[in-house]
Image (cartoon, rainbow, N blue to C red):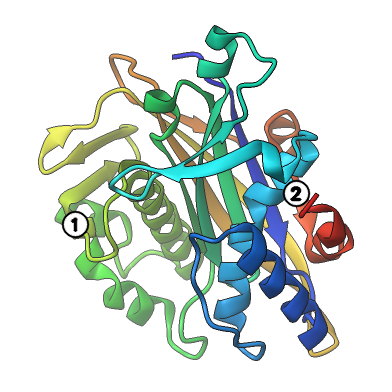
Amino acid sequence: MDCPLLVWMLSINREVSTDEYKECYELVKTCVPHFKIKAEPASGESFRQIVAQMMPLLMMRHRRVPRAKWKDSATPLGKHWIEQDPEGMHPDRWLRSMIGYSLAYESSLVGMAMVQGRQREVVNVGIGLKQLAVEPRDVTVKAYAESLSHKLTPLELSFVSPDLADDVIIRRLSILLALKQAYIKAIGQPIGFDWSRLEFNIPEESAKGDGAPLQGWEFRLFKAVLGVVRRGVLIEENYQCVSAFFRGTKESKFIWHDNQKDLESWVQFINVDQMVKVIPKLTA
């Protein structure tokens, strides 16, 4: 299934003003009517949710498609795709112009994975993000890993054994959780889904769901390193990122991208300043 996959990553690289929050809130209220949220300018969680809903608007603006010329649709499982106005488009081209997308956010990072093709194909896309940090910030890595053990299988727990170094545990844990989140989003499962039903065997690059092999999936794994200003101090944040897409191949495939050059053709990084600058253009 030769559907091109692209990822956009937006860094909330600084604190935003109340006026900027309100601008974003009003934009989403006007242009994304299916999304309901009350205004909470002091809430970082609220702002992340709003920015996530702005990502399709930014993407379609980048493609020079006016807002009036496309609509956002969803399957019964809540899998979203964008359908463009067929006017002036060959019917076959229009059928292959659907854009499926998946949104995720974590701390200072908001991500969107998107695929273009036929509707039944493009909805099978998901994105997962996991910051390489403990939560809450004052707990030990081992205690943090223990608090998430219910999301892992016995095999996966062996990969994050307490006798390993802290940085190894946090890296492996982030990979496992980002993989699971991406797959769960790709298949449109609800928030209460039992993550331990999935098992990712990283050394063997294989995956199972309810004990059966997951076949036909493509998992792309990469890292995002952000410089963000908090209370006037520049800090570095690291994230594990995963896209999941069903390509229908015989086996599932894991693709590891370890350097920035690998990402240039399919991952685009933007920041909150770039986003705020184009707000007036996103309703056009």
| Residue 85, picture quadrant | top right
- In the rendered structure, which amino acid carries the disc numbered 2? Phe
Q: Residue furthest front?
A: 87
- Numbered marks: total: 2
- In the rendered structure, which amino acid carries the disc numbered 1? Ser
The circle drawn on residue 196 is: 1
Please provide percent x and percent y for residue 25: 67, 74
Q: Is residue 178 above or below residue 231?
A: above
Residue at numbered disc 2: 269
| Residue 86, picture quadrant | top right
Do callouts 2 and 1 mark residues in contact (Cβ within 8 Å)? no
Residue drawn at x 66%, y 87% is 41
> Reading the chain from its start, which is encountered first: label 2 or label 1?
1
Tell which tag, 2 or 1, sits nearer the viewer.
2
Crowd tier of the residue under label 2, counting other residues whose Cα lies within 10 Å: few below 14, some 14–19, many 20 or above:
some
- 94 or 58, which is in the foreground? 94
